Image (tube, rainbow, N blue to C red):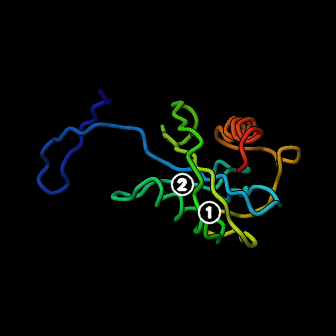
Amino acid sequence: MGTKIKKRCANCGAETESYRNPLPTVDIIIKVEDRGIVLIKRKNPPIGWAIPGGFVDYGESLEDAAIREAKEETGLNVTLIRQLHTYSRPDRDPRHHTISTVFIARAAGTPVAADDAAEIGLFNKNHLPHPLVFDHKEILEDYFRQTIHLKI
């Protein structure tokens, strides 16, 4: 059961109860041809390098959110390949308790920093930028460990 929070209605003043729940997010590891994976440097706190992604909108599927967030932050049209894993550690994001479903995707073209991205780059396992924010170092370690055996 989630944590109950009490709110007052702005119109009538009645007290209501609602639940405080984790926020669903998506992250997308985008492989661009044979040039590497896309990472963005965030322009909003926490500042650092991150896997492109963001919050799922109400009424939106995880898959649609991943495609939308990839386009908004990188300018790339992606093809989702598969889910990597769902990460849910309550402290993974210092701003909120989030649950992120991570997708692996392919794209062609040149990524462009947009939306929340101050910079963008293509990186590989042996050349990752620092600092990586959130739990993205752990996510990328899982990705590289799993993709050694897969043709992704």
Q: Which residue is mark 1?
A: 116
Residue at position x 69%, y 35% in the image? 142
For residue 130, the mark is none
Residue at position x 65%, y 37% in the image? 135
Q: Residue furthest top?
A: 1
Instruction: Classify mark 2: residues with Cα within 10 Å, few (<14), some (14-19) or many (20+).
Output: many
Helix, strand or loop under label 1: loop
Q: Would you place residue 39 above or below residue 118 in this image? A: above
Tag 1: amino acid: Asp
Q: Is residue 28 left or right of residue 149?
A: left
Looking at the image, how many numbered discs can be counted on the residues? 2
Helix, strand or loop under label 2: strand
Q: Nearer the viewer, residue 142 or 138?
A: 142
Q: Nearer the viewer, residue 11 or 111?
A: 111
- The mark nearer the N terminus, 1 or 2, is 2
* Picture quadrant where residue 43 is located: bottom right
For residue 54, the mark is 2
Q: Where's the N terminus, which quadrant?
A: top left
